[in-house]
Amino acid sequence: MDELKLYYLPTCPFSLKVLRFLESNSIVLDLHSTTEPANKEYLLKHGGKNQVPCLFIGDRPLYESDDIIDYLSEKYLN
Ligand SMILES: N[C@@H](CCC(=O)N[C@@H](CS)C(=O)NCC(=O)O)C(=O)O
């Protein structure tokens, strides 16, 4: 199974929307704040842009908060 990692920024409303979704559905993911320079570098290098939130599904970056929530809903809420 692909490892899931969420890159987010605590001050970003789109990140907060995803984090609230996780919390309200008791979904636990590996979280990486881009306030950490190493995480920001990883996101740019492996995702291709600095935009948050970004969910890594294995090596594959998924940007856009609504798409992330749709993906997680399919995976965890069905
Ligand atoms: N439509 C995107 C918007 C995400 C967005 O605008 N994130 C901002 C921070 S709140 C960002 O990463 N801006 C920097 C950039 O796009 O490079 C979503 O829903 O995830």
Image (spheres, rainbow, N blue to C red):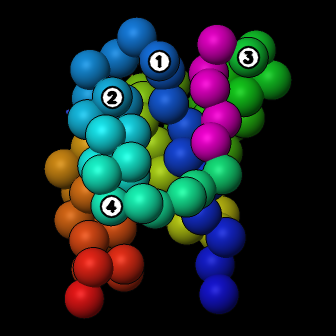
Q: Which residue in the structure is indicated by mark 3?
A: 36
Q: Which residue in the structure is indicated by mark 4?
A: 25
Q: CA distance from mark 1 to mark 2?
A: 7 Å
User: Which mark is first along the chain, 2 or 1?
Assistant: 1
- Can the viewer see residue 25? yes
Q: CA distance from mark 4 to mark 1?
A: 19 Å
Rendered view: 75 above or below 42: below
Residue 13 counted in the magenta span: no
- Can the viewer see residue 64? no
Q: Residues within 10 Å of mark 4 (few under 14, many from 20)?
A: few
Q: Are marks 3 and 2 in contact (CB under 8 Å)?
A: no
- Answer with left or right where residue 38 lies relative to residue 72: right
Tag on residue 10? Answer: 1
Q: Quadrant of residue 18?
A: top left
- Residue 9 in the image: x percent, y percent? 49, 21
What is the three-letter code of the residue carrying label 2?
Leu
Q: Residues within 10 Å of mark 1 (few under 14, many from 20)?
A: some
**The magenta segment:** 31-35
**Secondary structure character of the magenta stretch overall:** strand
Q: Which residue in the structure is indicated by mark 2?
A: 16
What is the three-letter code of the residue carrying label 3?
Glu
Q: In the image shown, does 34 or 46 lie closer to the viewer?
A: 34
Considering the image in quadrants, where does the C terminus appear? bottom left
Considering the numbered disc 4 on the image, is that residue within a helix, a strand or a loop? Answer: loop
